[in-house]
Image (cartoon, rainbow, N blue to C red):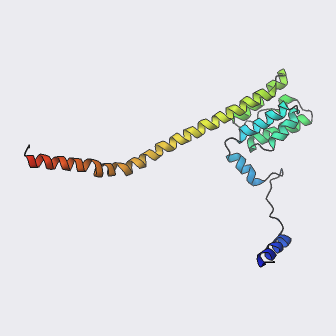
Amino acid sequence: MSAAAILLAAAILFGGAPRRRTTSRGRRAGSARARRDDPLAVASSLDVFAACLDSGMTVAAAAEAAAMSAPPPLAEVLVRAASLLALGADPARAWADPGTGDAIVTGLTRSARRSAASGAALARSVAELAEQSRHDATTAARAAAERAAVLIAGPLGLCYLPAFICLGIVPVVVGLAGDVLTTGVL
């Protein structure tokens, strides 16, 4: 057995597997930050919520299942609603708007309250919110790419313009000036 294998076995035996830091709800702290940075995390969480509702889960169970993969603002709303609905609270109270200012979260709470009052299918409106969230993320990405293209054009112009003048225009002007001066046109 090689020395590296012995050292590896000793490290595993005495050190154990590295432990990841978790938040108070048992989630991994690093994955919460990754979900917050992912522009499509809200859309995928809403898709999970809609799929759970389409499969026949109760609203409380579907909200709890979707909250596991949702970014923090949406997860808080889903966990709160799931907990209150599981305790038998009024759906209008469970889906009260938390005032986050997020249009998707506000739309979700409004759709859930409307669904509870009218009996309309919640899964369809949640799927539409997911599509709207994807559209918003696409629009934001396209706008960022267009801003980057504009910001890149300035420095590139400053780099290539002097080269174009020195290598393209000056030799033509010098050549024409030499021809004009030697022929005596002026």
Query: Who is closer to the viewer here, 3 or 103?
Result: 3
Tally of numbered discs: 0
Q: Position of residue 28 (x, y in %)?
A: 79, 53
Which quadrant would residue 15 be assigned to in this image?
bottom right
Name, please, the residue furthest toward the front: 1
Tell me the residue at 15%/50% (across/down). Answer: 178
Name, please, the residue furthest toward the left: 184
Q: Is residue 43 above or below residue 9?
A: above
Q: Position of residue 76 (x, y in %)?
A: 79, 41
Query: Who is closer to the viewer here, 175 or 29?
Result: 175
Tell me the residue at 69%/32% (across/down). Answer: 131
Quadrant assignment for the N terminus: bottom right
User: In this rendering, would 34 be left or right of 141?
Assistant: right
Tell me the residue at 79%/74% (across/down). Answer: 5
Q: Position of residue 19 (x, y in %)?
A: 81, 62
Name, please, the residue furthest toward the top: 118
Quadrant assignment for the C terminus: top left
Q: Position of residue 151 (x, y in %)?
A: 47, 45
Which quadrant would residue 9 be assigned to in this image?
bottom right
Tell me the residue at 64%/38% (across/down). Answer: 137
Q: Is residue 16 above or below residue 2?
A: above
Q: Is residue 179 above or below residue 133?
A: below
